[in-house]
Image: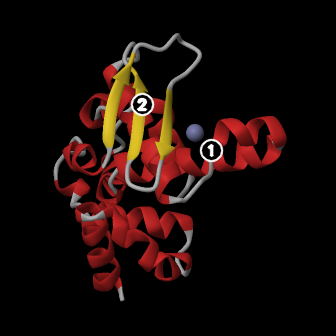
Amino acid sequence: MLGQIADVFAAFSQDAGHYQFFIPVLIAMTDIELIHQFVQAHRLHESIPVDLAPLYDIYDVREVDFSNAIQGFCYASKRHTVIGINAHLHPYMRRAVLCHEVAHDLLRHPNSLYLRSVNESRYRYLEARAQQGAAVMLVPDRLLRLIDAHSISIPKLENYLQVPAELIELRLKML
Ligand SMILES: [Zn+2]
């Protein structure tokens, strides 16, 4: 089953058109399992810091000259998903925003800016899920075990992983 799902994601990355066909398989998984499967399928956790290059092959990622108010966005059309990242953010934060937006896409969240105006609590729920998804992508499980064993500090880990401390803290809270 797990191998099959990995194949599903591999197929998705090659041809977004196949994605619709596999949706019934994906619904059976929880949100966080789904993120783990994506991480595995694209071998994101094989290097530290996590290598996000595969995401640039799957998504049309653009750095955008936004004001400080907007960190990023994800826009999915039928053929193509564009992820925008605020070009002025710190590099660690840009990594976090990229994974946050990828999580919105993987979890099939509809346009969240629209949702915010119609239903604030639903919006907050989706934001929290996307942020947890980013934490799973950027902080490999095996590293969490190291923190326990060697009591490595969060600021040290922040530089080692190139991930904002808040996301590492979130990942620890999810255990
Ligand atoms: Zn979001």
Q: Is residue 172 visible?
A: no
Give the x, y percent position of residue 160. 25, 34
Q: Tell me the quarter of the picture where residue 45 sits.
A: bottom left
- Estimate the spatial distance between the alpha carbons at disc 2 and disc 1, rounded to whole Å: 14 Å
Does residue 141 sit above or below 171 in this rendering? below
Does residue 20 sit above or below 97 in this rendering? below
- Could you classify mark 1 by the number of other residues whose Cα lies within 10 Å: few (under 14), some (14-19), or many (20 or more)? some
Please give the residue where the numbered disc 1 appears in the rendered image: 111
Label 1 near ligand 1 (CB < 8 Å) = no
Does residue 171 sit above or below 161 in this rendering? below
Task: Identify which residue is drawn at 28% across, 83% down.
Answer: 3
Residue 82: assigned label: none
Q: Is residue 13 left or right of residue 28?
A: left
Q: Is residue 31 left or right of residue 11?
A: right
Q: Tell me the quarter of the picture where residue 116 sits.
A: top right
User: What's the amino acid at mark 1?
Assistant: Asn
- Single out the residue that lies furthest toward the front: 78
Question: Looking at the image, is mark 2 or mark 1 earlier in the sequence?
Answer: 2
State the residue in front, 116 or 18: 18
State the residue in front, 80 or 129: 80
Q: Tell me the quarter of the picture where residue 17 sits.
A: bottom left
Residue 84: assigned label: 2
